[in-house]
Image (cartoon, rainbow, N blue to C red):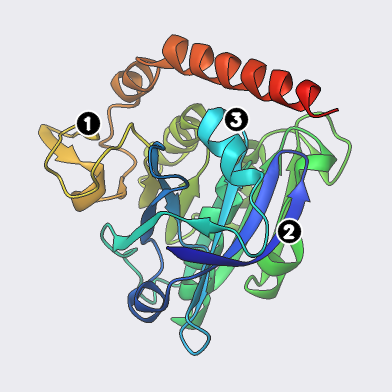
Amino acid sequence: MYRIIQTETLAPTISKLVIEAPLVARKRKAGNFVIVRATPTGERIPLTIVDSDPEEGTIVIIVQAIGKTTHIISGLRAGDHFEDVVGPLGEPTPVSDFGTVVCIGGGVGVAVIYPIAKALKAAGNRVISIIGSRTRDLVILEDEMAAVSDELLVTTDDGSYGTKGFVTDALQKIIDGQGNPDAVYAIGPLPMMRAVANVTRGPEIRTWVSLNPIMMDGTGMCGACRVTVGDELKFACVDGPEFDAHLVNFDELIARNRTYSDPEKESFEAWKNSTETTDCRHQ
């Protein structure tokens, strides 16, 4: 059992949890993730380790409530427990002193790009960060990203905060105004990462993306998280989660991620209805 030390609402549907997991806290590096299970019969889902405190023995995860399991996790409070927290998993982020690096986070992907930007800054890079969301209410970790960046740009789709437009618009402006960066890291929805790859492919800018395919065991045994990278079949849980953006078959990955969309919706609706019924009985 893994005790929750603290919870915080960062934005509508987005929650931050500090969890007691001393072994994971001591070993994690930027890019690593954990697979968590909230209840004994619950679904196992992968979540990036946003931060850790080895002395306190805690890790930080951020989750967006979309389906049944993420809603359950978002409803947990300090003093509650996770049944399982397995990790750190995955390969650490390739970090080096490249020079100028652009770190891009879209939506809740900002939670994933933050530890990477932090590690790149510590390695001596000049870090330009771009964070984007649909609207102002969904902007997260702005202060934290600013603290690890030499320059921070915020975009919103509707223009309610920062600059109106997409993260790719901001990236193109950087390229046009400052020249090609030495590397780009982009994390967010698959269409966003594909769009970033399309921007950087022509000028041949090294670009990494962190993939979020369907994942089950996290050890490469089940094959659920397979992705096509160049001419090779890779498993995101053990070979990634980060890959060369210009080699990823995004169309295939997007199609595979939709495989269980209908059953997931049905599961969420059934859980939501049962929860509402239970609440009514207790009124």
Q: Residues within 10 Å of mark 1 (few under 14, many from 20)?
A: some
Tag 2: residue type? Glu
Q: Is residue 83 left or right of residue 243?
A: right
Tag 2–tag 3 contact (CB < 8 Å): no
Which sits in the foreground, 244 or 227? 227
Q: Earlier in the sequence, mark 2 or mark 1?
A: 2
Which sits in the foreground, 228 or 197? 228
Q: Quadrant of residue 34?
A: bottom left
- As drawn, the label of residue 224 is 1
Q: Position of residue 42 (x, y in %)?
A: 41, 37
The C terminus: image quadrant: top right
Q: Position of residue 4 (x, y in %)?
A: 58, 64
Q: Quick one: SS at disc 3?
A: loop
Q: Earlier in the sequence, mark 2 or mark 3?
A: 2
Q: Quick one: SS at disc 2?
A: strand
Residue ID at (15%, 34%): 223
Residue 202: in sight, yes or no? Answer: no
Residue holding disc 3: 66
Q: Position of residue 2 (x, y in %)?
A: 46, 65
Residue 30: in sight, yes or no? Answer: yes
The residues tagged by marks 2 and 1 sit, at their Cα atoms, a distance apart of 32 Å
